Amino acid sequence: MKFLFLNPMLINMKNAGLTLFVLMFCYTVTFAQVSEEERSMSQGMYNALVINIPNADDGETEKLWKKFMKSKKAKTKKIKRTAEWLSDNAEISGLGVGEVDVYATFENSGDDVRMVAWFDLGEGYLSSMAYPNEYSAGEEMLNEFELVVYKEGVKDEIKEEENNLKKLESELKKAKKDKDRFERDIEQAKDKIKKAEANIESNLVEQEEINNRIEEQKKMVEKTKEKLHARDN
């Protein structure tokens, strides 16, 4: 019997995609639970689907919701004097084609957004009790939207980290320029030192010559003094 030994790094590389999928799945299961409850809205008291969207704010989530519902062939508009957004005649897989009106509200809850959605199917509002076969389609749609918000948040984080990277790269570029300048300063200083050392050598030679001239001049002084005393005799 032969045993196959695999490089752990190779296993990790092959399973990287699977790991990411598992992490995102766990994220969805842990943080994107959809619940249902009777909630009051502009049309009355009806069953609603509720989802908590982590690390989001209501303003940005509303913008993403309008864009998201546009992909469902629905035009989304704010209902006057309410906090509700109406997406009219949405095409939602599992709920019908152009037959679903979706009402939604978004409210900040700490660092999260609490989203409440009512699905008007025409004959009634979506609930697990009245529409057990269709209910999962509503859940899937809200989970899909939560994932959209999550990805947009990650994209924003990527942009921020990329900006931080650019700043660091800019700092590194400046540091390299500073190093080049320091090296030029050193080379210039070395040239000055060489010139100064050469000047010192010349200066020593000059001093020696001057000392010799001084000795000669001293002799001339003495000879001149002798001339003064010579007349006295």
Image (cartoon, grey):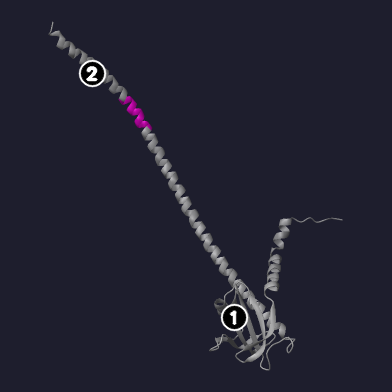
Which residue is under mark 2?
217
In the image, residue 131 sits, relative to residue 223, either above or below, namely below
> Could you say which is closer to the camera, residue 63 or residue 185?
63
Q: Quadrant of the C terminus?
A: top left
Q: Quadrant of the N terminus?
A: bottom right
Q: Is residue 171 left or right of residue 113?
A: left
Which residue is under mark 1?
106
- Label 2 packing within 10 angstroms: few (<14), some (14-19), many (20+): few
Magenta residues, start to end? 197-206
Query: At numbered mark 2, what does the secondary structure look like: helix, strand or loop?
Result: helix
**What's the residue type where badge 1 is placed?**
Phe
> Could you say which is closer to the camera, residue 199 or residue 131?
131
Residue depicted at 69% across the width and 63% down the height: 16
Residue depicted at 50% across the width and 54% down the height: 172
Q: Nearer the viewer, mark 1 or mark 2?
A: 1
Q: Is residue 175 left or right of residue 65?
A: left
Q: Position of residue 101 (x, y in %)?
A: 62, 89
In the image, residue 28 sits, relative to residue 88, either above or below, namely above
Residue 157's label in the rendered image is none
Q: Is residue 60 left or right of residue 49?
A: left
Farthest residue toward the bottom? 123
Kindly report the distance in space between the C-alpha atoms of the residues bearing marks 1 and 2: 106 Å
**What's the residue type where badge 2 is placed?**
Gln
To which quarter of the image does residue 96 belong?
bottom right
To which quarter of the image does residue 66 belong?
bottom right
Q: Position of residue 165 (x, y in %)?
A: 53, 60
